[in-house]
Image: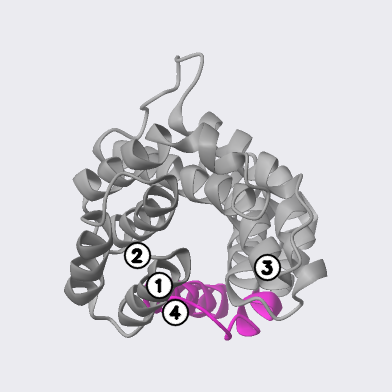
Amino acid sequence: MSKDQIFELGVQANEKMNAGDLDGALEIARRIGNLGADYYVSYVVSGLLIDLGNIKANENIVREGLELLEKDFETIIRHKDLAPAAYYNRANGYYVLSHFRRMRDPYAGYFEKKTELDEAKFDYRKALEYNIQDANRKAEIWVNLGNCFDEIGRVVEALECYDEALKYKPDHGMALGNKGMALFHYADVTGKHERTFLLEAYSILSKAKSEVTTESVGTFSKYLKYIQELF
């Protein structure tokens, strides 16, 4: 099967994923995976598995995707058109594994020299080294890098990343929403300026509407309601 045909199957899987048909998307991913041991097959299938494992909250699927990507990673990144997405997908995989781990143990990785989150940050930065033309993808990478910093309480660095994302796509819902939540938590340490930061957080959260995940819609709404109650 040609690259174009494999790519088209990947597009179909993503369409099913976006429509909520996760099992259908997984079935297509498995079908592509059965086409043989090829770096392009690994590239397409690994990205699908990492995304599906994240959405389905299935750690095993995420790990399967990461292992498949690692197997052919050096070959994949030699192709400049594939390298940015390969780093991005691998970063997403590590970030999701870190999230699963912290759900089991909030203090996981505190005394380790290198964690999954460190790997994710490194790969997001590597992806940003490439000349990515898609403004939305560039914004997504900055948002996810910001989430890495926010995960460990480095709010200022997280805010800087969200601002970078908004330079490329000013209406990026996840960048706006995550920035609003970060400002909400940062307000606790601003003393007499707390109310100003809370109002700014409310204003930004109110604009987080486009391309926002279903789960995030509920989260952002809770923060908006809580800020209203505070005032």
Q: CA distance from mark 1 to mark 4?
A: 35 Å
Which element is circle 4 on? helix
Q: Which of 50 and 5 lies nearest the eye of the viewer?
A: 5
Identified by mark 2, the residue type is Met
Residue range corresponding to the magenta coloring: 202-231
Answer whether labels 3 and 1 touch (C-beta < 8 Å).
no
The local crowd at label 4, few if under 14, some if 14 to 19, many if 20 or more residues have their Cα within 10 Å, is some
Residue type highlighted by circle 3: Leu
Counting from the top left corner in percent of width and height, residue 37 is at: 30, 44
Residue behind mark 3: 198
Left/right of residue 60 with respect to residue 139 in the rendered view:
left
Image quadrant where one finds the N terminus: bottom left
Q: How many marks?
A: 4
**Magenta stretch holds residue 215:** yes
Q: Earlier in the sequence, mark 2 or mark 3?
A: 2
Q: Is residue 190 left or right of residue 39?
A: right
